[in-house]
Structure formats: C-alpha cells, structure tokens
Image: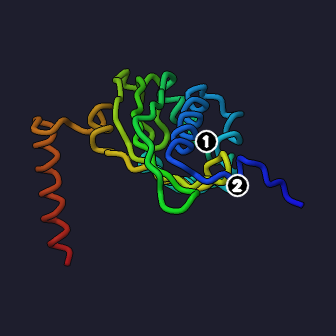
Amino acid sequence: MPDQSVATTESLTHERARALFERTYELLNTRDTKRIPEIFTEDIVFQDDAWPETVRGHVEMERFLGSIWTAFPDFRFELINAYLGEGNTSAAAHVRVSGTMHGPLDPPGFAPTGRRLATEYGGFYEFEGERITRGRIIVNMNDAATQLGALPPPGSRGERAAVMVQRLQARVMRGRR
C-alpha cells in the first residue's frame, strides 16, 4: 500500500502554502544544489522569464540555479506574500530577489557588472506533497536588464540611440516585403 503520509494528503491552505514557500526560499538561500530534491520533484517542469528554455528535472534545475548563483553569489529570495490557487495543489508567490552581479550570467553570456539587482516577481506553482512539480516565474526582464547595465535607462541617450537603430531596422524589414 502506498505511503499516505500527512505531507502528501494534506490540503493546501493559505497557511500551508506560505509555509511551503518560506521553506523553499530558505533552502534556496543556502545556494546548495544538493538540496534541490528537497524542493522540487524529479519530474519538475519550470519556466522562468530569465531562462531561455523550460527547465526539466533536477539536472537542469541545478544548471539553472547554478547559473544564477555564479552570477550573483549573494542572491537572496524573500517571500512577500502567498496566494492560494484553485483546488488543493496550486499556489502563487510574490517574491523579492536581490543580489550583486559579481560573476558572468550565462546564458545569455553577460560579463559581471558589479551592479546590484533588486526586483520582484510572481511565481505560480503546483505542489506534490511538500515539493514543487510545476513552476512559472514572471519577471520584468526590462527592469532587470536596465539595473544590470544590459539595457540603457529610459529617456537616456542610449535609449534614444537604440530607438534610432530599431527604426532603421524596421525600415529595412518593411523594404524586404
């Protein structure tokens, strides 16, 4: 008979969702890839706006998190709030992250800037017991890229130059039709 422990059969309440998120971010803040199986199921499917492909399984999750922790050795997650989804297996989290870019960010291949990143994101998750089995992170990548120096600030000369380049490209693209 399968194990019917409280952890796998307990309904997901707002309080339990908050506790699961707090535990998840506490473990992620240790930056220890050996703890990935404590947080994510082996068949995890995870999408993050900051990553170019869907993360599947522990090996890919280790690569994803390792890339973040290499670029931002002091990267921290902080739960702002938890929200209960429909049914008893899904929840959302409003999270603040911060860290200083002391290492390369690969992908996409950015060099360290020494700049601080501080932003918030929304995460949507499905749980199996105490672990995440599906995740989707939505983050303002324009804001993050501007903070890190990968994009020019709004209203700057750099932004105006980028707009001029885009207009030239648009003119060329219209001419190819």
Residue 87 image offset from top left, x and y in percent? 54, 62
Q: CA distance from mark 1 to mark 2?
A: 31 Å
Image quadrant where one finds the C terminus: bottom left
Task: Report the residue at 30% width, 37% height from top.
Answer: 150
In-image side of 118 versus 154 (left or right): right
The figure's colour scheme reads rainbow
Q: Earlier in the sequence, mark 1 or mark 2?
A: 2
Tell me if 22 is positioned left or right of 172 in this view: right
In the displayed structure image, the side of residue 5 where residue 69 appears, left or right: left
Tell me the quadrant of the picture where the N terminus can be found: bottom right
Residue for point 42% across, 25% down: 99
Residue 47 horizontal/vertical position (percent): 50, 54
- 141 versus 135 height, above or below: above
Element carrying mark 2: helix
Dot 2, crowdedness within 10 Å: few (<14), some or many (≥20)? few
Name above or below for residue 118 compared with residue 137.
above
Q: Report the front residue among 62 and 87.
A: 87
Q: Closer to the observer: label 1 or label 2? A: 2
User: Pointer 1 and pointer 2: residues touching (CB < 8 Å)?
Assistant: no
Residue under label 2: 9
Q: Position of residue 36 (x, y in %)?
A: 67, 39
Asked where in the image residue 89 lies, by quadrant, the reply is bottom right
**70 or 47: nearer the viewer:** 47
Q: Which residue matches tag 1? A: 63
Image point 48% across, 61% down: which residue? Answer: 86
Residue 32 location, x and y as percent?
Answer: 65, 29
